[in-house]
Amino acid sequence: MACEKFEDQIMNYFEGALSEQERRSVNRHVAGCPECHLFFEQQSRLEETLAGGLTPPAASPYFRQRILRQLVRESQPARVPYWPELLDLLGAAAVAVAGGLLLGRLTADLPALPPKAGVVMTWAAAGVCWLAGFGLAIREGSRRFGIK
């Protein structure tokens, strides 16, 4: 077993984590300490075996293309389906138009209005209600999607 103080130093020596001065200190100690010398030799043989016996695995020729394609796919924002929001908008618009038509019909029979004014008021009320519903739907959609 190597000296407790130098065992970590010897490991760091082979990892390349020592300064030149620390490397010289380890070399001097290993030259004079038989236990550390044995540990140093074992580590040296282990390093040689690992360096010579292990080769990096060969990647498939299409590996780089697959990785790049996956990166592009993951970097794109997720597509949010807009059909539910569109259907909400259409539903709100339909309710607004129906409310406007009902409001227009209720006010069209007032005796002081000329005959064509009832039709104009009906469609005006429907348009105002539709615009209000459209504005609410836009506000809700932008809040949901984080648009400012």
Image (tube, helix red, strand yellow):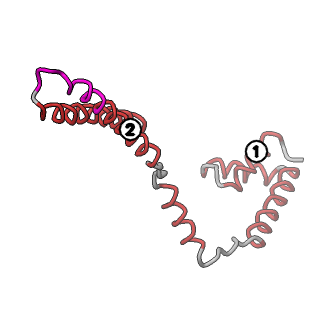
Secondary structure, mark 1, is: helix
Q: Residue at x 81, y 51 (%)?
A: 32
C-alpha span from label 2 to label 1: 61 Å
Where residue 141 is drawn, which disc sits there? 2
The overriding secondary structure of the stretch rendered in magenta is helix
Using residue 110 as the reference point, say whether residue 11 is left or right of it. right
Q: Residue at x 27, y 26 (%)?
A: 103
Range covered by the magenta-colored residues: 101-113
Q: Nearer the viewer, residue 62 or 139?
A: 139
Quarter occupied by the C terminus? top left
Q: Position of residue 118 (x, y in %)?
A: 17, 31
Mark 1 lies on residue:
8
Q: Residue at x 20, y 27 (%)?
A: 108
Q: Is residue 120 magenta?
A: no
Secondary structure, mark 2, is: helix
Q: Position of residue 136 (x, y in %)?
A: 33, 32
Residue count near mark 2 (Cα–Cα under 10 Å), binned few <14, some 14–19, many ≥20 = some
Where residue 115 is drawn, which disc sits there? none
Kind of residue at badge 2: Gly
Q: Residue at x 55, y 62 (%)?
A: 70
